[in-house]
Amino acid sequence: MKAVRFHEYGGLDVLRYEDAPEPAIQADEVLVRVKACALNHLDLWLRTGVRGWKLSMPHIVGSDVAGEVVEAGSLVTRVKAGERVLLAPGLSCGQCEECWRGRDSACRSFTIFGVMVDGGYAELIKAPERNVIPIPGDLSFEEAAAVPLVFLTAWHMLMTRARLEPGEDVLVMGAGSGVGSAAIQIAKLAGARRVIAVAGSETKLAKAMALGADSIIHHQKQSIAAEVARLTAKRGVDVIVEHVGAAVWEDCFESLATYGRLVTCGVTSGAEVRLNLQSLFGRQRAVLGSYMGGKGELMQVLKLIGERKLRAVIDSVFPLKDARAAQQKMESRDFFGKILLRA
């Protein structure tokens, strides 16, 4: 099969479109012909190297996959050849206490397609049967691939960790990202009174409004904290969806209302931040970490996606052989929603 692999860590030039061995499935696994694979910032970090993670080389990244079943192992009973499917991106043992409780990402063996196992930058991928899900409704392969990781992450942040309630105000950082564009929709569907979207261009902010944002902040021209104070009459917001890190941390924390919850899932601008403990306990605020989510949460999301109550946001689609160009576009930050590869 053809695949995009890297044999060493580095820049875009380490990505090679080349022949690779076809995956051999076990009795409980499914072989899927990849039709579409969505990019995530995780792909870039893995390519350049993540401290403490030792990847097998050569390596294939790609966590969000949709395609057709080619072959099912002898123990597989739920899917068959020819079915249109997507893959739940998180891989866990399915047998420990955390898995039984639906907290897949707390499993000690948890990983994601494209991390400790090969991912979707390829013509074929293998997956455990429990990770193979029929594509809901009339979604295209591209739409299906654009959903799992970012919508699951945004849902887990808002609904599970922050416990968003109807009538609350939500601030969404990085509105043009996959997580940001998903969070705007989920917050509105959950009954948020006001969703404030933050981005760095007029184009992204206009698209955020089209997705349902009620107010916008241009972070290159406006102070986030000052604008939140103005929009909320100095009250602050109840929930903040944050995945940028150090560059916006103080503005975000200052924007929290009393009893506000800041939930974070990423550190694209740096991981080291300062925290004023007096403001934390005095205003009874909460800072919450969030990482992916469980398959049960993904099924909730997919039901809403299939009913078109939530929708995939696609920026652009590249052929698999042009993975370098796709990752270069992601590095430029000149996109809104998801960038995809078509195998």
Image (cartoon, rainbow, N blue to C red):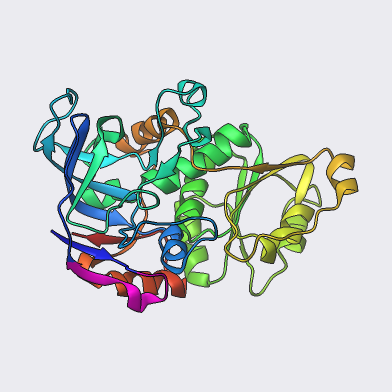
Residue 334, visible in the rendered structure: no
Q: Is residue 248 magenta?
A: no
Q: Is residue 289 left or right of residue 273?
A: left
Residue range highlighted in magenta: 8-18
> Quarter of the image holding residue 167?
top right
Name the residue at 43% across, 43% down.
111
Q: Position of residue 209 (x, y in %)?
A: 50, 57
Quadrant into which the C terminus falls: bottom left
On screen, residue 20 above or below 34:
below
Name the residue at 34% across, 48% down.
117
Residue 181, visible in the rendered structure: yes
On screen, residue 241 above or below 207:
above
Q: Position of residue 80 (x, y in %)?
A: 12, 31
Q: Is residue 3 left or right of residue 284?
A: left
Please state which of residues 145 and 335 is positioned toward the viewer in this rendering.
145
Q: Is residue 9 magenta?
A: yes
Please state which of residues 12 and 308 is positioned toward the viewer in this rendering.
12
Name the residue at 76% across, 48% down.
256
> Quarter of the image holding residue 223?
bottom right
Q: Position of residue 15 (x, y in %)?
A: 31, 72
Quadrant into which the N terminus falls: bottom left
On screen, residue 74 above or below 118:
above
Tally of numbered tags: 0
> Quarter of the image holding residue 294?
top left
Q: Position of residue 280 (x, y in %)?
A: 83, 44
Name the residue at 45% across, 52% down.
211
